Image (cartoon, rainbow, N blue to C red):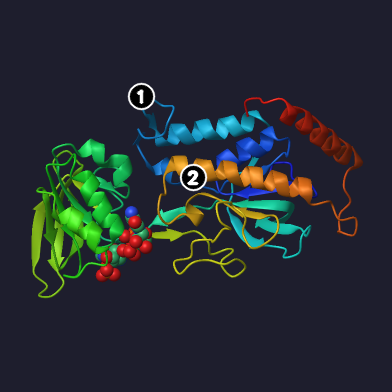
Amino acid sequence: MDTEVRETENVVIVGSGPAGYTAALYTSRADLDPLVIEGFAWGGLLQQTTDVENYPGYPEGVMGPQMMQDLRDQAARFGTRFITDDATKIDLADEAGGLHTVTVGGKEIKARAVILAMGAEPKKLGVPGEDELAARGVSYCATCDAAFFRDHETIVVGGGDTAMEDATFLAKFAGKVSIVHRRDEFRASAIMLDRAKAMDNIDLVTPYVVQSFEPGENGSLGKAVLENTEDGSTKELPVTGAFVAIGHKPNSHLVADQLPVDDEGYLLVEGRSTKTKLPGVFAAGDLTDRIYRQAVTAAGTGCMAALDAEAFLRDTPIDPEAHWTPDPSRVEEAGQAVADSAAVAAEPTAR
Ligand code: NDP
């Protein structure tokens, strides 16, 4: 590990989607000198996306990987340090002022505050062709990709609210949307189901599961092979777009036994903040969000987590009994920073 790691970090950010990098941007600009454990596959889900056209500030759109590089570079510009490896263990202190420990590559990193931003992953069907045709017709985000399927024949897989919402949104662009669901009954709320049913170009195809996705002549998705869950018969649907909407799985396994999570494993935060139950532990992005899951909302909560962490560090005095000794020059610097920020607060300025 080449990155310099301090004996005690102010803030360690775990995760590197829009939430993690935005938290890094804000905490680095606040002189907190953050360390980001960005993961081996840094950049989160947007690394697997092509065009992103719904992130404000990019009028021409931007490729997902480019956007993540931009967010990372912006955080790096203010001194953020990165470890491009996965956290394997997180031990959270439960008393105010206690140090949290994040383990990476066998090394234990101590931190006064931790921002958890490990994201969530869409669940996959696990059928042949799904991985090969991802971003070539198979998508997990209708909000992101529906506009690329204008007049196409498409399917949405799933029977919950996300599937209904995706289908209704997609139907504004696509020529046809077939909702493929494994049961005749739908888990989705009645209102969402009725809204989907009311669209002329939406069909319900039940009780079917996808058996495989197959490429067309151009190498992109050409058809979905469906299997009837009652009689085992199969049929083929010629489609060029398939949106898998069978739920998400938050990446909360490293902390789920230390912090409250909901029934699906999403971390619970206090009200409209990013505070978790434990002092100095904040959570942001899709890890806490089962509803919106957008890059821009993740970035927004990353900013909130940084501000919450900054306030926590300001208001939580360093415990002289703790098993580390503060560097006196940093304490002096911190005092100066507080004085500076008080002066800045007196004069409104751009953040
Ligand atoms: P859900 O878990 O509610 O639904 C997942 C759907 O996918 C179910 O119909 C399930 O089938 C199906 N499914 C799961 N695994 C498979 C599989 N391997 N093969 C085929 N089908 C499968 O997830 P959602 O993402 O739809 O919703 C998550 C939460 O977010 C819910 O609480 C929902 O209400 C909420 N939400 C709210 C919205 C809103 O209010 N605007 C919008 C979107 C989501 P089965 O039913 O047979 O189990």
Residue at 8 percent across and 69 percent down: it is: 233
Q: Nearer the viewer, mark 2 or mark 1?
A: 2
| 102 lies left or right of 286 | right
Sort mark 2 into few (<14), some (14-19) or many (20+) by Cα contacts within 10 Å: many
Q: Is residue 106 visible?
A: no
How much space separates mark 2 and mark 1, taking CA atoms? Answer: 21 Å
Q: Is mark 2 within 8 Å of ligand 1?
A: no
Q: Position of residue 45 (x, y in %)?
A: 43, 46
Residue 68, horizontal then vertical, whole percent: 48, 36
Q: Residue at x 56, y 58 (%)?
A: 269
User: What amino acid is labelled 1 in the image?
Assistant: Glu
Provide residue 84's location: percent of width, then percent of height.
59, 45
For the residue labelled by badge 2, is the local secondary structure a helix, a strand or a loop? helix
Ligand 1 found in image quarter: bottom left
Residue at 22 percent across and 54 percent down: it is 156
Could you say which is closer to the camera, residue 304 or residue 91?
Answer: 304
14 left or right of 345 in image: left
Number of other residues with Cα within 10 Å of mark 1, as a class: few under 14, some 14 to 19, many 20 or more: few
Q: Which residue is mark 2?
A: 298
Q: Which mark, by number, is residue 350?
A: none
Residue with the mark numbered 1: 60
Please state which amino acid type lies under the numbered disc 2.
Ala
Q: What residue do we see at 30% from left, 56% from top?
A: 162
- For the residue labelled by badge 1, is the local secondary structure a helix, a strand or a loop? loop
